[in-house]
Image (cartoon, rainbow, N blue to C red):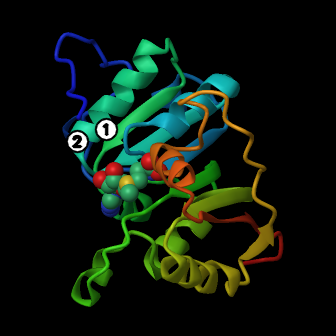
Amino acid sequence: MTRPRADLDVSSTFLEPERFPPDEPLRWAELFGDDRPVVLEIGSGKGLFLANAASKRPAHGFFGIEIAKKYARLAAERVVKAGLTNVRMWPGDAGHLMARRVVPASLREVHVYFPDPWWKKRHKKRRVFNETLVDSIARALAPEGELHVATDVEEYFGVIRELVGNDPRFVQIDPPPLGEPESDSDYLTNFERKYRIEGRPVYRSSYRLASAPR
Ligand SMILES: C[S@@+](CC[C@H](N)C(=O)[O-])C[C@H]1O[C@@H](n2cnc3c(N)ncnc32)[C@H](O)[C@@H]1O
């Protein structure tokens, strides 16, 4: 298991929630230094998606939320080591942040990759992808904004498709194609790499915010 490196300065990327007034909306322009389009990822793990996407799209701002502080720190280290300046990592709960701290219609995209399935019936209420999150995402996305989801858990995928696919605020679109990876870092996320190498199925779906009044 990789350990965070105390000697690496990640202060440009790793945000300290204690420094922000509680429950006040985040101002993307202040966080990124300009008015760029913002892409948000829920449950970033060690930050492979953020690092790859941020290097391919330098004019966008990428905001990762990761509840495990250690992973949030590792993700920040990954992007700092890659010399990327357009990523910010928030160590904290995505459900809370999405419900309380995102300015309505302010995000270009939301990505949720391999959310923890919480297999046991009594634990399923801990799942991050639920009705409340869908409401928060619908509120947070700008017109024509996109939601991209992937999971290896067929049952969870069914729940997500029911929640979003039956919601008139969203229209289903084709997920972006996955390329043939040429290196270890050439995957969508760490979990996508693990499951693809193991030959396990990966279920993906994408949605666009419908233009009809909500
Ligand atoms: C199975 S891992 C997937 C990580 C990464 N998306 C990937 O595909 O490699 C799920 C991640 O979501 C994080 N997570 C779980 N609940 C969360 C929440 N409420 N808010 C933010 N992150 C959360 C976990 O700590 C974990 O890093």
User: What residue did someone put label 2 on?
Assistant: 69
Residue 137 position in % (x across, y down): 56, 65
Q: What residue type is labelled 1?
A: Ala
Q: Residues within 10 Å of mark 1 (few under 14, many from 20)?
A: many
**Residue at the far front in the pictured view:** 198
Q: Is residue 30 visible?
A: yes
Q: Can residue 15 be seen in this view?
A: no
Q: Which residue is drawn at 43% across and 31% down?
A: 88
In the displayed structure, would residue 157 be above or below residue 209?
Answer: below
Position of the C terminus, as image quadrant, is bottom right
Foreground pick, 207 / 132: 207
Position of the N terminus, as image quadrant, is top left
User: What residue did someone put label 1 on?
Assistant: 72
Foreground pick, 40 / 196: 196
Q: Do the residues labelled 2 and 1 touch (CB within 8 Å)?
A: yes
Residue 17 position in % (x across, y down): 25, 40
Q: Residues within 10 Å of mark 2 (few under 14, many from 20)?
A: some
Q: What residue type is labelled 2?
A: Lys
Foreground pick, 81 / 120: 120
Q: Residue at x 26, y 44 (%)?
A: 21
The image quadrant in which ligand 1 is located: bottom left
Residue 146 position in % (x across, y down): 70, 57
Q: Which residue is drawn at 63% across and 80% down?
A: 161
- Give the distance between the C-alpha atoms of the residues marked 2 and 1, in whole angstroms: 5 Å
Q: Is mark 1 on a helix, strand or loop?
A: helix
Q: Residue at x 45, y 22 (%)?
A: 79
In the displayed structure, would residue 12 be above or below residue 164?
Answer: above
Tell whether 19 sits left or right of 105. Answer: left
Tell whether 96 sits left or right of 163. Answer: left
